[in-house]
Amino acid sequence: SNSPPVNGIMETSLYVDDLSASTAFYQRVFGFAINFAVDRLVALAVRPGHVLLLFTKQGSVTLPRGAHHGDGNLHLAFAIDANQVEPWRAHLAAQSIVIEDEIHWDRGGVSLYFRDPDSHLLEVASPGVWQNY
């Protein structure tokens, strides 16, 4: 490829009905700190250099510069270490979060799938899911 390199995904967005409830969910389940918050957006610190943006649905449609808007159920996967699958399983159970599916991949990775308050499909996945992860 002739493309210049990228260093990863800096931020990704989810669109939510109740910004306060979704923010509380991601703080409770993942421990993400708030980087920035306004009435239509909360930016959560996933780890250094990685940000999860939560936008209120329809909250940015009228903004002049590159409005953020999306709808429907989306998917987001978080990378975890191989030795963290069982602790994550226990943590989700302690939070009364149902694991909807579990996949043991041919390359050795394990994925646990569950939903956030807006029914976005979340995944925690250990190495061995993809050729490059």
Image (cartoon, helix red, strand yellow):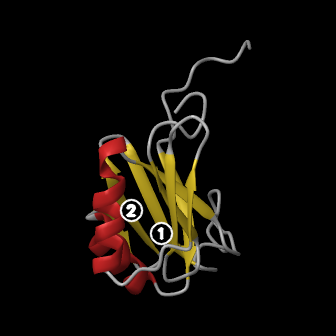
| Residue 115 in picture, x, y percent from top left | 52, 75
Left or right: residue 94 versus residue 121 is left
Distance from label 2 to label 1 (Cα)?
6 Å
Left or right: residue 60 versus residue 99 is right
Left or right: residue 100 versus residue 37 is right
- At 59% from the left and 44% from the top, the residue drawn is 105
Q: Is mark 1 on a helix, strand or loop?
A: strand
Which corner quadrant of the image does residue 34 belong to?
bottom left
Nearer to me, 52 or 112? 112
Q: Name the residue under label 2.
A: 43
Residue 53 shows in the view: yes
Compared with residue 87, is residue 108 higher up or lower down, i.e. above or below? above
Residue 34 shows in the view: no
Q: Name the residue under label 1.
A: 54
Q: What residue type is labelled 2?
A: Ala
| Residue 2 in picture, x, y percent from top left | 73, 12
Look at the numbered discs 2 and 1 and tell me whether their residues touch, using CB distance below 8 Å. Answer: yes
